[in-house]
Amino acid sequence: MLLSRSLRTAALAAAIAIGAALPVHADEQFFPLQSYRVGPYAAGGTGFFGGFIDYLNLINIRDGGVNGVKLTWEEGETQYEVERGVEVYERLKNHPGVAAWNPLSVGIAYAMIDRITKDKVPLITINHGRTDSTDGRVFPYVFPLLLNPYSETSGIVNYIATREGGTNKLKGKKIVVLYHGSPYGKETIPIYQLLADKYGFSLEQIEVPHPGNEQQSQWLSIRRAKADYVVLRGWGVMNPVALKTAQKVGFPVDHIIGNVWSNSEEDVIPAGDAAKGYVAITTQASGAEYPVLQEIIKTVYGAGKGNLDDKKRIGSVYHNLGIVNGILNVEAIRIAQQKFGKRTLTGDEVRLGFEHLQLDPARVEALGAKGLFHSINVTWDNHEGDGRVTFQQWDGTKWKVVSDWIAPDWASLRPIIEKSAAAYAAEHNIKIRTSDDTAVSQ
Amino acid sequence: MFDYQFFIEVLVGGLLSGVMYSLVAIGFVLIYKTSGVLNFAQGAMLLFAALTFVSLVERGVPFWLGAGVTLVIMVALGVTVERVVLRPLVNQSPMTLFMATLGLSYVIEGAAQLLWGTQVHGLDLGINDIPFEVGGVLISQFDLFAAVIAGALVTAFALFFRYTRTGLAFRAVADDQFAALAVGLRLSRVWAAVWTAAGIVALVAGLLWGARLGVQFSLSLVVLKALPVLVLGGFDSVAGAIVGGLLIGAIEKLAEVYVGPLFGGGIEVWAAYVVALAFLLLRPSGLFGQKLVERV
Amino acid sequence: MSLVATAGGDALIVARARERATEASRVARETSRATDAVRVADAGVPVLTLQGISLSFGGVTALDGIDLAVAKGEIRAIIGPNGAGKSSLLNVVSGLYRPDRGVVQLGSERFRHVPTARLAAVGVARTFQNLALFKGLPVLDNVVMGLVHRRRAGFVRQILSTPQARREEAEARAAAEEAITFLHLDAVKHQLAGGLPYGILKRVELARALVARPQLLLLDEPLAGVTLAEKRELAAHLRNARDAYGTTIVLIEHDIGVVMGLSDRIAVLDYGRKIADGTPDEVRSCQAVIDAYLGVAHEGETELVI
Amino acid sequence: MTTPTRSASLRWLTPNRFGLSVLLIAAFAIIPFAGSDYLLDAVLTPFLALALAALGLNLLTGYAGQVSLGSAAYLAVGAYAAYNFNLRLHGLPFLASLVAAGFVAAAVGIVFGLPSLRLRGFYLAVSTLAAQFFVQWTLTKFGWFSNNNPSGVIDAPPLAVAGLSFSGPVGRYVFSLTVVVVATLLAIRLLRSQVGRNFIALRDHEVAAKVIGVPLLRTKLLAFGVSSFLIGVAGVLWAFAYLRTVEPAGFNLDRSFEILFIIIIGGLASIRGAFLGAAFIVVFPLLLSRFGAALLDNVFDSGVLEMSQRIVIGALIIGLLIAEPRGLIALVDRVADKIRRRLFRPQPGPIRS
């Protein structure tokens, strides 16, 4: 556990921590990290921020930064608590050269929307966050990259359809959504209903109260309902308990489909054998066989600068999500640099980079991430970027991809998102952007 | 048409869950009975025990040796707590002591994660949780096993208190601290013994809950399940903890299944409290709690 | 205390008891000298009447068919060995216990169970055996609390400090100051009750009870645990209170010496029954009392308390 | 309940009038101009909100002796009530929403205070958890409270009172400060009235209080009501002046414990204690993490630092309770007394006998 890292120079860290203003170094792009390495969600936090930092390190060591611009960062522990996240935001926001914020916490992200919009710095909520922030016309600085909750819902239903042999086979099927009793858990309730109406499957949505360490009654209800599939929209300890309780009531585990927060090793390992055969959605495959991971192992961990204490976690779901997040951030900077020059960019300039973050499969392959994730296509008004999803199955020791890259039904979701975004705009007196308003402010 | 089979299934499931709550509640009762402290650190102790055990086993220590070593550590922890926290705070108000145990839970949680990391671990006790059927009702093997363990633990404690010197001293202290002091019982020794006992309960509960939830930070949250049990059963009654646990378990599940849908579900969390409260209005000191005649 | 302890035979306790007994008798003589004549009880309507009060705790009888009538202006003592039911009786009168049978009559109102919350309003105040002061309040505020039942201004008026609230506060303070002066507590009135010595606290509690000028004052061992000098002083205060305010006093006491000199009439309880009721002289000569109560003393010691 | 041996609250204004004025002038006239955004937004504003919440809980627990573990629920009620008043009653001035939110919190507090009529001590304490869980469940469950936001999150409107805008770090700070000062003055006033005495009487000797005619039912419920009123107003500040976006999950049990910590550490039954405790709880972890990061960052991983901090904070709480169970305020008073005794000639002590 005692890991000596000398990622930052002592002087820099000390000076910033004490609050002294520093002159801008040569060219640097700074990532303030609202990480969480303690508390109930520490496992996810260490994996994600570990992967993110590993990738930033790779760019620094291998390439000497992005076109010579060094990447720097500083961590502020949040324990996943909103006010700690806000404190870290206030503390680090004046650091020179802030590129983007990546909190990996719905609560913190929400609390930052007003602040980052005012400060004109992008806020990246990969795979989570506010669904309607997909609408870049209303949320110019928020990027729920790859997958928002609605797309996830659609992706899961599409996957079930492929397993049944087509969307027309969904008719008459019974799907139960077991969701965490929190705003996060409830967010997709209307979308499942919408899809149920559209495809004609019957739907039951059952809540598990936080933290979810007891689910006997819910699973007995599921058994009584004779569900064909259970979608697990879980969180933390709720996931292994769901799998264990499913076993207890005799529900077949391979008919439980986990969502994007129920798809990590941490969710299945505690369930032991009960998790064998469990399937979950993901935007990024796990495993360390991809070239970019191999390079990280060789270059970063080889130099003793790896961020994970436990090397077995390299290539785990959260670690890979962190790496993909690193790729997306770095590529956004690279794209923005093509416009503004190879120097430290402002947050608003990086935002423009994100709004042109278009990585086709060929570019993804060139980045050494073929198979790790599919592609992304962010535009000024679509801040999600049409990420594809895939499904992985737990074999008792590791995740194995069991599907192609599946596309959610974006077209039918977009109107709902726009409606919600419009309501937000009205409530907050926000002028809806047009493509003419995307220029970087000076 | 009322589905009796389903009702029984829910009821049995609830009772078996209740056993798990009782297991946690007993740890509270032991300490409250002797020192009047509501030990909120019970959850942290549970986490600490389970995490220590699982980390030892993952490092190749055999199961029983791991359990033994953890036990020794828990005993050491109990004695240390008595020494460092309780003894200097003797004669302080119950609230101050409660706060101290909150502080203690920070220390223990921090230490547990500092020592063993924040990883999530699986814990396999070697009990296959394939359910079996009795008259169309599914019963979980693991839950039955947990119930047997809990029963054994309670029996062991009962025998201990009845037939050993320390046990008798424990009961004397529980009845009347001052009287016990007057006849020359060493409170500190009894307290150390009690915290040790609570440590053992934490280990057993930690292993059983850990096998269910995985060994991770959230393990310390199971104390919240024990609190309504304590209110219902009385803070100072082991029997109350058991009966209270069974009742809360059963009521909670039945409420969720039959009343929950009226409100859209998820009522388990507070339903337990509401039931406990309603009951308390009738009997302010719980099922088996001591009724105090007000002396003026 | 002394009587029971002598039966135990512990030399030290016996010696101390003997010492205390002689002192107590001296106090009694002095106090009786201080008042010229024993006040004859008012013959009017009794302030307090008990009819057939019975009370038991889980099968153990605490009170058994107690009848008692206390006249206006009377100082009435209730004595008896430990566990005779004296405190229970007081708790029944103040409504803290609900009797199994019987009626309590306070002035003209009859109760099966005295409503404690209305006790002060019907003109009854009491003190407690082990002091029941509000430790977190200064002495003055403790005494002001004795008038709480007269407050009419609600909390909104109090916050806004309306004329009514201000007037009530001023009146309460003035009354409290008077009671404090009456009981010679001026020097400590701004100190928190929590830090004061026992003897002074006994007086503070008395002041809190007296400040409302109650019709009936119930005192649970007002003289227990204080020094001899304080005992003398308190006894004088009680008598003064009766004389000055016309308050009827019912007191429970162990210290028979003081009681004999202080009281107009004495009721004796034993095992929850009333075995005697009369003037000090009558009680002194009552054989049942000597057997039940004083007999204990005769076995061990020759206590010339009476 | 611990009983303080000195009545700090009642001495609040008299001997310290000078010090208090200096403090207020500094808080109103100097800090808004001298403080950095970070200080105002991330330190002082949450400090003020938490101090007010602690003051509210202190009325209930410290003064009236009724333990509550559900304070965060009333913070949440305040926040969501103010949001809905503001949203649904157009033209209602923000200050009116704030006060109305306080009243809603008070009403909820009174309902959950009902068990106090039968329960004491830990039975009461644990039963107040019902408020904690029930309120969180309600706010999550019924979308109406968050204007059907799919995530249950509410966003604060910009702060404005009588046409004056209080957005911006300075405005939010000044607004919070004003609300807290007014609320504190009202609380002091209450405590010095008969109601305040009734609270203390209830705490120190419930039976005696009943016998002398303190209306127990009304006093207990009033304590719950006033306490949750203040906590509710604190919730409005927390949500609207500090975080500006809140979700029900933010008002969890940890927050309730945090507020309880503040009053225990600061000192039960002391108004200054609530402020001192809040300052400690807000500032100390920040200092610890900054110093930890500055000194040891190269040696240890940030996770290790965080966990060590948790241990340090826990140990400090225990240590403080051992060293001074009456809280920081008693410690401060003791030191101040010592200094005063050094500076001035010893005065004739209180009468002892």
Image (cartoon, coloured by chain):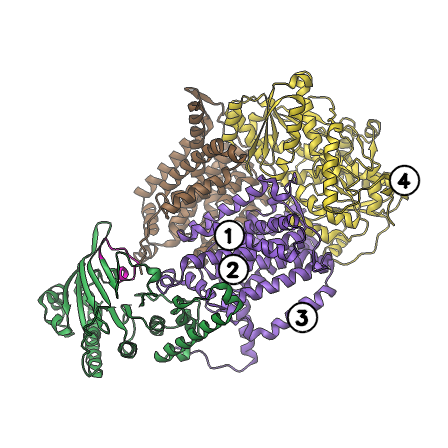
Chain colours: A yellow, B brown, C green, D purple
Picture quadrant where residue D201 is located: bottom left
Q: Amino acid at mark 4?
A: Gln
Q: Which residues are magenta?
A: C89-102
Measured Cα–Cα span from mark 1 to mark 4? 59 Å
Measured Cα–Cα span from mark 4 to mark 3? 53 Å
Secondary-structure class at tag 3: helix
- For disc 1, the marked residue is D109
Is residue B199 visible to us here? no
Q: Which mark is residue D58?
A: 2
Q: Earlier in the sequence, mark 2 or mark 1?
A: 2
| Marks 2,1: beta carbons within 8 A | no
Residue closer to the observer: B160 or A131: A131
Measured Cα–Cα span from mark 2 to mark 3? 25 Å
Secondary-structure class at tag 2: helix
| Marks 4,3: beta carbons within 8 A | no
The chain ID associated with circle 2 is D
- For disc 3, the marked residue is D25
